[in-house]
Amino acid sequence: MGSENNFEMKVVTGEFGYVLQDVPHLTDYISDLQTFPNPLRFNPAYSVVKQYFVDMDDTVPQKVVVHKETPRGIHFRRAGPREKVYFSSDEVHACIVTCGGLCPGLNTVIREIVHSLDYMYGVDKVLGIDGGYRGFYSKNTINLTPKIVNDIHKRGGTILGTSRGGHDTIKIVDSIQDREINQAILLAQVYIIGGDGTLKGASVIYEEIRKRGLKVAVAGIPKTIDNDIPVIDKSFGFDTAVEEAQRAINAAHVEAESAENGIGVVKLMGRYSGFIAMYATLASRDVDCCLIPESPFYLEGKGGLFEYIEKRLKENGHMVIVIAEGAGQELLTAKHEQDASGNKLLQDVGLWISRKIKEHFSKQRKISITLKYIDPTYMIRAIPSNASDNVYCTLLAQSAVHGAMAGYTGFTSGLVNGRQTYIPFNRITERQNNVVITDRMWARLLSSTNQPSFLSAKEVDEFKKELEPPTPLLDDGRNGEDENSGNTDMNINEIKKSIMRSE
Ligand SMILES: Nc1ncnc2c1ncn2[C@@H]1O[C@H](COP(=O)(O)OP(=O)(O)OP(=O)(O)O)[C@@H](O)[C@H]1O
Ligand SMILES: O=P(O)(O)OC[C@H]1O[C@](O)(CO)[C@@H](O)[C@@H]1O
Ligand SMILES: [Mg+2]
């Protein structure tokens, strides 16, 4: 693991600063590929659509807020069916794998890939790879048919199983190639659903396939409950998670309201990115304080959390705190353990903060409080996706299938400014999407909860200096504009460490 990515992006430039960050195509490394008319031409559902094939020149801009003088900037290829396809229906044997943590909507994506392949392109040979990347070489597979997957979107989790670790590029590509030779079929399309780690893995699989000259399209579908994947508007399952988090926040509020000096603490997922906590807080209006990994905080003294809690208890008699799992990790004793994929294992910040608050008020301030701690994290992650996420999953899956059939490879499908696009792997894996605390969205949250920012004016300036791009509206995703809070390259942990107050 930790493999180097030698990805070279295809870049096309045009007038007025137009840049297309294109995705690879099978014809980039295989010549004389046969094409076929898209079977959708004869599909009654599509034949009524006014323009049913996407124009080859259609691209989608990454930035929609522009100035009169700014260049047109970065664009991505628009997703959708193409007039010509590079696979005949009966030659394709596709496979689907899910990796990393669970996320609402995984089953919907699997279902929609199987249905799209069959109903749109007549591809009926689809294998499910069992248990993540290692399932490729342990050769555990499940035959997926529209009938088998018909109801799976109503269930949480992934019917294929998932895992962390076990990515071995050579073994995985050997197994893809083996199937081609031994079974006299072409394992021609590999659909990989997963987060940043998974897509780094997908990228090296694509590189190896390309090196071997195989006619195999590798398509990714970005998955992350934390919404920590850059470029895309948001990740599937995120809305469901925010919605489900409301139930925990409501419970915390009811408990807190019903007790004297009641404090409800809710921990939500978000290893490095506090999006779920931020949106769940904004949606709920019952939250008095939201703590996220991107925004440092401290407990004691003037402007600290304890002072704020005391103030809220005096004013309201109760309060609710939402804390993302990655928040305040700098304040806890470091744990040097990693999961099988190499992700740092975090301490339980919810338990820690609950203990600290209890100690402070009961022992030091001699104020009697009633604190209830709710950790709904895995309950949230395990539910099926809600209606809007189901639609989103469907679009992502259909776009991925259209792309692979059209011969694109080394790409993920993704929503950019409300349009389905094909994004090169490296744009998705090059950095993490974080809440930018100098953006308007975080300001909106602070003004809605009235919590302190825990930063002095000097520290805010330091953050701004670090986060502000040298030129405004740079189209490299670092302009800090507020539509897609989180488009920044910052190394937030470094900044946080340098300004963190000692307790
Ligand atoms: N740099 C890498 N190169 C190759 N494979 C990787 C890399 N990072 C992670 N992987 C593989 O990708 C799979 C999933 O990675 P990981 O556990 O980090 O989850 P993820 O895809 O980031 O999802 P999430 O973090 O949202 O749960 C694992 O099988 C892991 O071995
Ligand atoms: O316990 P697991 O399955 O390793 O996953 C926990 C992590 O996975 C995530 O849900 C991301 O998939 C994080 O929010 C969380 O830290
Ligand atoms: Mg990850």
Image (cartoon, helix red, strand yellow):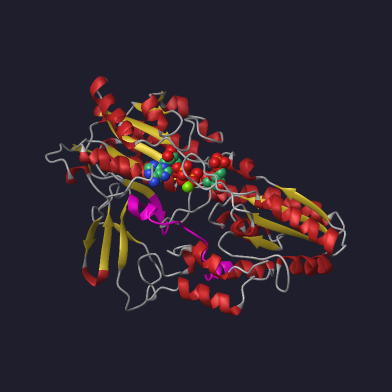
Q: Is residue 485 above or below residue 92?
A: below
> Which residue is rendered at x = 54% and y = 50% of the image?
238
Residue 80 lies in the magenta stretch: no
When asked about the image quadrant of residue 14, the answer is: bottom left
Which quadrant, please, contains the N terminus? top left
Left or right of 163: which side holds 380? right
Q: Nearer the viewer, residue 230 or 280?
A: 230
- Residue 274, given in percent of the width and then of the height, sits at 57, 57
- Residue 234, given in percent of the width and then of the height, sits at 48, 54
Residue 75 visible in this rendered orientation of the protein: yes
Left or right of 72: which side holds 235? right
Q: Nearer the viewer, residue 149 or 484?
A: 484
Residue 433 lies in the magenta stretch: yes
Left or right of 431: which side holds 381? right
Instruction: Point out the stretch of residues depicted in magenta.
Output: 414-442
- Residue 469, given in percent of the width and then of the height, sits at 41, 73
Which quadrant, please, contains the C terminus? bottom right
Left or right of 8: which side holds 480? right
Residue 392 visible in this rendered orientation of the protein: no
> Which residue is rendered at x = 75% and y = 52% of the image?
252
- Residue 308, given in percent of the width and then of the height, sits at 74, 68
Q: Is residue 497 above or below residue 207?
A: below
